[in-house]
């Protein structure tokens, strides 16, 4: 019997709807992994996604637990040219310089709500799921929860934005720019974090109006904006872990359960294996900026020059660089260059005619990170990449571009497993110096912290089974919590009672007022009595 299955076979099997929209396979992978574990426990898995993304299921034996007949279409994804423009806009934005420009691409992603909402109405009615597990980008799943009473688990790559604030974390959760906590933050950093929301008002207010208009045009009159008492009203599963995330007190509906990783992943192909074996490479730098980051030519030249310097100085003996189609175009102006310490023009390197450079349109990332010869990962710092690097014990040199990436750079430095670079001030000298600092590791702190985090990540990775336990708890609580006589459902068993109370009651403001009146009355009576006694003495 699979270890993922319950020993108690009397538990009811249910139908679980997995939902993934924009964001690509990176966003789908943790949702699908939870679906695999649920399937191993006997549940029927239904999958809804945008057109063409069903290939993830149909082309991979890893997802054979989903029948093709249980795959449902949620409409068209972004067109390739729209997707390219969207991520270029995200990459160009900088929350430190221009909040309006940084925020603008959100309209593109959130604009999918209308299509997602109408398609999910159809899919939910057709499949009657007992539970929904979705990526956090698909906001329409919250509408399904509200309208149909279907319990929802939403997978976040980090602690959700704007929820569960803590006095020791400056500013709004998820929007830290230069300090993860107040512990080592200066007074000025804390003040800036507190004032940052006011700077965003002129950007956020028009956005909220746009969302309200979009929802009303679809016939939806209620709002999902109010998360009661600053807590989620659904099961929020965070694909990260304490040690990387800044610890704070969380309600039962918010759980850090990452890294959510599969035990199986593609191995090195023959060419990559030969590259590592040739010259017995033991100090390889792996460079990958994910699916959506495209470095401009000038930054490509800067990075290649710094990597060439590392090779020439013997700090590393090989470079593996995953270069997609769009990124490859940015190499074109450099083809005849002999950048930095190159022993051949860039055109020769791109064709893998060097025994020190290996370029590939796709790298089996986890196999590369797991190879003992990989000593440094130059990355965009996306949540999945950071999780995988720490799980496999590789030091990081992140260049955060947007969303959670710059924040992950802070987390990497705080954890002592790497040093972050600033996309706005990227220089060849800084890349070389910080790479040298991490690689030489004069005091051994990077090695110790990487090993510390590798152990923590491996243990925490077991929590994906706990995540599935929580999903089942939520599902059974809703399934058997309905009173057929009254038609009412019991409150969620993981939801704290204050989330269902008015503010005055949850904060005991009535008792505070009553106590204040009592104290004032006692003080007045005491004064009167003192005055009365004084007159008679």
Image (cartoon, rainbow, N blue to C red):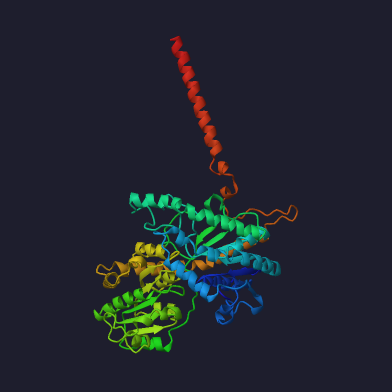
Q: Depth check: 453 or 84 in front? A: 84
Query: Front-most of 229 and 423?
Result: 423
Which residue, as the protein is rendered here, is positioned at the far right?
485
Instruction: Please say if 134 is above or below 532.
Output: below
x 35%, y 73%: residue:
299
Residue 205 drawn at (x, y percent): 52, 53
Question: Which of the 4 quarters of the picture holds residue 502?
Answer: top right
Image label count? 0
Check the picture and name the quadrant holding the C terminus: top left
Task: Give the left or right position of residue 420, taking residue 35 as reference.
Answer: left
Q: Is residue 512 left or right of residue 335?
A: right
Considering every residue shown, the one lying at the far front of the view is: 333
Decide: is 358 above or below 298. below
Q: Nearer the viewer, residue 305 or 273?
A: 305
Q: Position of residue 138 (x, y in %)?
A: 57, 65
Left or right, 515 with respect to 122, comes to left
Q: Position of residue 407 (x, y in %)?
A: 41, 62
Q: Is residue 237 left or right of residue 98?
A: right
Does the rendering let one see residue 251?
no
Q: Is residue 491 visible?
A: yes
* Image location (x, y in percent) of residue 154: 56, 63
The image quadrant that residue 458 belongs to is bottom left
In the rendered image, which quarter contains the N terminus? bottom right
């Amino acid at each position: 019997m699979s270890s993922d299955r319950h020993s108690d076979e009397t538990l009811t099997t249910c139908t679980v709807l997995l939902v993934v929209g924009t964001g690509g396979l990176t966003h789908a992978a943790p949702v699908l992994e939870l679906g695999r574990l649920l399937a191993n426990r006997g549940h029927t898995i239904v999958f809804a996604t945008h057109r063409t993304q069903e290939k993830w299921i149909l082309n991979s034996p890893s997802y054979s637990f989903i029948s093709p007949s249980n795959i449902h279409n949620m409409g068209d994804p972004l067109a390739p040219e729209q997707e390219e423009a969207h991520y270029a806009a995200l990459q160009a934005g900088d929350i430190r310089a221009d909040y309006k420009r940084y925020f603008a691409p959100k309209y593109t992603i959130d604009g999918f709500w209308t299509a997602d909402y109408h398609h999910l109405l159809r899919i939910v009615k057709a499949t009657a799921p007992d539970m929904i597990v979705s990526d956090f980008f698909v906001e329409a799943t919250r509408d399904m929860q509200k309208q149909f009473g279907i319990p929802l688990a939403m997978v976040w790559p980090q602690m959700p934005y704007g929820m569960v604030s803590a006095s020791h974390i400056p500013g709004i959760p998820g929007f830290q720019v230069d300090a993860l906590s107040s512990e080592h933050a200066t007074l000025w950093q804390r003040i800036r974090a507190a004032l940052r929301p006011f700077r965003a008002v002129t950007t956020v207010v028009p956005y909220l109006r746009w969302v309200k208009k979009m929802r009303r045009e679809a016939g939806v009159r209620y709002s999902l904006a109010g998360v009661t008492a600053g807590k989620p009203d659904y099961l929020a599963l965070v694909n990260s872990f304490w040690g990387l995330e800044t610890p704070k007190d969380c309600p039962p509906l918010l759980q850090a359960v990452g890294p959510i990783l599969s035990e199986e992943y593609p191995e090195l192909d023959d060419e990559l294996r030969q590259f590592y074996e040739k010259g017995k490479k033991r100090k390889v730098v792996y460079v990958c900026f994910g699916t959506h980051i495209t470095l401009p030519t000038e930054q490509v030249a800067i990075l290649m020059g710094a990597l060439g310097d590392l090779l020439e100085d013997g700090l590393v003996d090989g470079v593996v660089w995953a270069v997609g189609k769009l990124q490859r175009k940015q190499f074109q102006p450099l083809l005849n260059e002999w950048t930095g310490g190159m022993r051949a023009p860039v055109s020769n390197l791109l064709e893998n005619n060097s025994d020190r450079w290996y370029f590939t349109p796709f790298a089996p990332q986890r196999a590369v990170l797991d190879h003992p010869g990989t000593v440094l990962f130059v990355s965009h710092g996306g949540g999945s990449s950071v999780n995988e690097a720490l799980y496999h014990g590789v030091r990081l040199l992140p260049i955060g571009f947007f969303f959670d990436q710059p924040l992950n750079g802070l987390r990497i430095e705080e954890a002592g497993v790497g040093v972050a670079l600033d996309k706005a001030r990227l220089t060849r000298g800084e890349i070389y110096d910080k790479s040298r600092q991490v690689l030489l590791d004069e005091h051994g702190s990077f090695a110790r912290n990487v090993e510390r985090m590798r152990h923590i990540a491996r243990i925490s990775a077991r929590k994906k089974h706990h995540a599935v336990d929580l999903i089942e708890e939520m599902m059974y609580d809703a399934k058997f919590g309905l009173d057929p006589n009254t038609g009412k459902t019991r409150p969620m068993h993981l939801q704290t009672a204050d989330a269902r109370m008015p503010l005055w009651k949850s904060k005991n403001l009535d008792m505070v007022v009553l106590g204040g009146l009592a104290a004032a009355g006692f003080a007045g009576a005491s004064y009167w009595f003192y005055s009365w006694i004084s007159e008679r003495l």
